[in-house]
Structures are given as structure tokens and as C-alpha cells.
Image: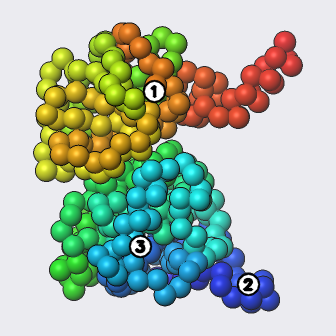
Amino acid sequence: MKIRLISSLSLVMAMMMCMPQLHAAEARTLVAYYSFTGNVRTIVNQLSQQLDADVIEIEPAEEGLDYAANNYAIGSALIGGIREHPDDPSSYPAIKPVRIDLSNYDNIIVAAPLWWSQMAAPMQSFLFQYGSMMQDKNISLIVSSASSGISGVVSDAKRLIPRGRFINDNLWIRSSQTSQAATLVAQWLGGLTLDEPSSDSDMRIRVSDGTHTVVFALNETSAAQSLYDMLPLSVEVNNYGNNEKIFYPPTTITFGDDCIEGDCPAGTLALFSPWDNVVMYYGAASRYSGLYILGTAIEGAEAIGSLSGTITVEKVTATSPIKGDVNADGKVDVSDVNEVINIILKV
């Protein structure tokens, strides 16, 4: 069994040039982890003894920060900044550079602690930089927390790795269980299949009024699943306040203890349970009681504020491509523009 640690690039350039390159034949699984208290590092050490994988540690660029001081003042401020501006690179704390070729891997295991119901900020920084390179790779998560559920971390991962093939059997180890990591990791690996994603691992929905279209990636909560199971729908959309569009499903969305509460940046899809309505935010909103996050816009977030009249809400499947996705890669980007140009030039 061969495990290799790829250290962060804090060394001088001469040493950096001497570092060995990884090759696909050596390992097809990468474990990327961040650890603040040491719990995640302990878990990954146990994992590395049971799994043939390469391991990379994500480290903050600024050393010595005490994220837990003053009731996690620094950590909560970082998470708040990301929530407020999730698409702004400056919202993410700097991390030490890493040297990794993701094309060498089929499977990515992301291991991180939970901060204020979200993925720890340094790991979010890593995925913000590299998540787009993890398209179609099998993604599984290991999360350490005191007691809070991990659905918010899963939601962050899906936002940051929009085209990943997520495995739903994630490993959640509470801090009080860290001493049992070897057993828990073994049990998890015994039931883990990295070859194929779960059938419901990519719940995406399209909301359209015929002119404007938004695509949301749903999280793995019971509430999101309840909405997904209702589709397709044709409902009226209404403006509320100056930052949200709302609609009422024909039946009540059911939800359980796995619900995600938190601030809602623009592009968030949420359930407001007291009114039984679904909210699409085109302006940021703070958390409040009974507001549960369902997912995040991955295409057309800027169009939410323009939705009006009767809208259709439907599942996005392989047979229902996203509008404007000319090359059928699941997203609308500059490659689709290039494809159109190529088609025109051939006419």
C-alpha cells in the first residue's frame, strides 16, 4: 500500500522543482483535507492506513490564526463573508499553493471540519479554486463536527464542485468519536462504492417563465427531496420585499431534522416553512426561524429577479438539457459560444 503526502508549496523554488510528480498509475484516489483542531488529521491518518490514496493537506496562507478565539470570531466572519458573496474570489481566505494534477484521479475524498453549519473556510477556498477541475469525478466527504449535522457542508461541496459525481454515503464523525476513527473509517470504506454515483446524487431543477430561466442544484435534505419529488409544477411566482421571488407548491413540503438554516446569499433556493412557500433570493437575506436552505443557483442566478407570471419548475435530467447548453456539458459558458461560432462558420 502506497500513500504519498503532497505538501503545500511553502518551500523555496529550488526545493519545489525537486518535488516528485504523481502519476495516474500510482493512485486514482486523492484525499484533500483541512484540519484545525487535529480531529480531521487523525481521521485522515486512519484512512491513509486503509486506503491506497494520495493525500494533500490544505493550509491557510496566514499561519497562527486562532479561528476559535472569542467564540470563533474569525471563523464565523470568514463563513459570513462567503455566504454573502459566494462568487467573489476575495471572499475566500488565502491558502498556501498546492501542486496537484487532478487529471490523475478518478475519486476525490474531501475531509474538513464543520464551522457554523458550513464547510471550514480554508477548504472552501481550495474547492473554489479547484472544484471546476473535478467535473465527473466521484466525490465523497468526510466531516468532523461537535454535534451539528453535515448537510450544510454537503451543500457547500455541491456548490463548489458543480459537476462532481457525488457519492451520498458520506462519513460523519463527531469530535467525541475521533478515538474510534479507525473502526468508523473501516466500516465506511466497506460500504463505499466509488465507481458509480448514487442515482439521486445530482438533483437539479429548472425554473422558467418562458423568457427567463434559472437552474438550481438541490442539497441532500429531506425538504429538497420532497420538493424534487413533486416536480414538474406549473405555479404563479410573486415578488416579495425587494430581494425574493416566491411560489407556493400545491402540497406541503415535508422536512426533518436534517434541514439547513443559515444566511441566504443571492441565488439561494429556500423553504419558508411557516408559510409553506419556496423562496428564490435575488438579493441576500439573513437567517431567521423556519427558513431552510434547499439549494443554490448554478445557472441564471441573475435572472431570478426577472421571473414573473406562471413559471414551470421541472427536473433537469440527461433528456432535458439546460437552455443554451449547446455542447451538452451541463452548463452554459464560453464553450457554448465557441460552439455556436463554429457552427456558423461551417454553414
- Residue at 28 percent across and 48 percent down: it is 287
Amino acid carrying mark 1 in the image: Ile
Q: Image height check: is 191 above or below 227?
A: below
Residue 223, quarter of picture: top left
Amino acid carrying mark 3 in the image: Ile
Q: Image height check: is 189 above or below 181?
A: above
Apparent side of residue 37 relative to residue 134 in the rendered image (left or right): left
Label 1, residues with CA under 10 Å away: few <14, some 14-19, many ≥20: many
Q: Element at badge 2? A: helix
Q: Which mark is residue 304?
A: 1
Apparent side of residue 286 relative to residue 100 in the rendered image (left or right): left
The percent position of residue 169, horizontal first and vertical second, equals 28, 56
Pick whichever of labels 2 and 1 is earlier in the sequence: 2
- Residue at 65 percent across and 81 percent down: it is 9
Pick whichever of labels 2 and 3 is earlier in the sequence: 2
User: What's the image's color scheme?
Assistant: rainbow
Camera-side residue of 190 and 216: 216
Pick whichever of labels 3 and 1 is earlier in the sequence: 3
Q: Element at badge 3? A: helix
- Residue at 13 percent across and 50 percent down: it is 257
Q: CA distance from mark 2 to mark 3?
A: 31 Å
Q: Which mark is residue 16?
A: 2
Apparent side of residue 134 relative to residue 240 in the rendered image (left or right): right
Residue 189, quarter of picture: bottom left
The percent position of residue 315, horizontal first and vertical second, equals 37, 25
Question: Can I make out residue 4 in this image?
Answer: no
Q: Element at badge 1? A: helix
Label 3, residues with CA under 10 Å away: few <14, some 14-19, many ≥20: some
Residue holding disc 3: 74
Amino acid carrying mark 2 in the image: Met
